Structure formats: structure tokens, C-alpha cells
Image (cartoon, rainbow, N blue to C red):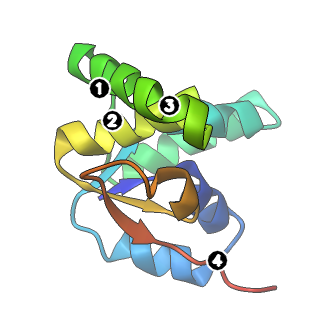
Amino acid sequence: MIFDSDVLICFFRGDAGAARLIDSQPVRRISIVSLMELFQGARSKKEMAELRRFFRDNSFQVVPVDEPISYAAAGLMEDHALGDGLPVSDALIAATALQAGDTLATGNVRHFRRVRGIQLKQFRPAVR
């Protein structure tokens, strides 16, 4: 399963459902784009190092953006940017899931639901 950054943000904020979802997956992946989004939200170098350590210690594979992902994302932008407002980051994450043939776990299903062929696992954070 590929995890969108929103699921991981919920996990880091203590959401038990996010923890269960992550723990239930024998194969855990994250797009490098989601990792960069998490780095962008970090408040210090220490937090960035903690993120890296978490992904390493929990056997996450960080999937780089390669040529096939780039072209698939460009196609998604062509199909969805004007009508659906698909941002570049989400196009890259969706293309990563499509190229891997893997399910994308996200709380933002509406960002991805018009992408043909994508497998989505909707995540709903706990209400606080």
C-alpha cells in the first residue's frame, strides 16, 4: 500500500486508525513527493531526522519519481488539471500508485477519484 501524506500526518498526531492501517500492511510505500510534503511541514532538522528514522525503522519503501511516473503524471495533469484542479503533487502521487499497481491510502479521495484505474483506500481520521 502507498500512503498519502495526510494519513501519515494523522498517524504522527496520534490517530489510532492511522496506526492500525499502517500496521496492517506488510508492504508499506510512500512517494518521495509525500516525504517532501512531510519535510515541508517539519519544524526542525531534528523532526526531519525523526521522519527518516520512522520510515526506515518501519520498513517503508520511498518510491522515487522516475521517467514512467513522470510521464504518467504529465498525462494525468493533461486530463485533470483544468477540469478537476489536480495539483502537480497529487498527480505525481497518483502516478506512483498507478505505476506500482498498488492501492493509495488517502483521506483526500476527492483529489484522486476521477483518476481512471487508481485503487483507493479511503482513510477517515478519528474525530477529536
The quadrant the C terminus occupies is bottom right
**Coordinates of residue 57 in the picture (x, y in percent):** 39, 51
Specify the amino acid type for callout 3.
Val
Above or below, comparing residue 77 to residue 20 in the picture: above
Above or below, comparing residue 34 to residue 110 in the picture: above
Viewer-nearest residue: 123 or 117? 117
Label 3 crowd (10 A; few <14 / some 14-19 / many >=20)? many
Residue with the mark numbered 4: 125
State yes or no: discs 2 and 1 in contact (Cβ < 8 Å).
yes
Res. 17 image quadrant: bottom right
Residue with the mark numbered 1: 72
Res. 41 image quadrant: top right
Specify the amino acid type for callout 1.
Ala
Pick out the residue farthest to the front: 83
Above or below, comparing residue 12 to residue 111 in the picture: below
Which label was assigned to residue 100? none
Residue with the mark numbered 3: 33
Residue with the mark numbered 2: 95
What is the spatial separation of the Cα atoms under label 4 and label 3, in whole angstroms? 21 Å
Pick out the residue farthest to the bottom: 127
Closer to the camera: disc 2 or disc 4? 2
At a point 22% along the width and 66% down the height, the residue shown is: 26
What is the spatial separation of the Cα atoms under label 2 and label 4, in whole angstroms? 24 Å
Label 4 crowd (10 A; few <14 / some 14-19 / many >=20)? some
Specify the amino acid type for callout 2.
Ala
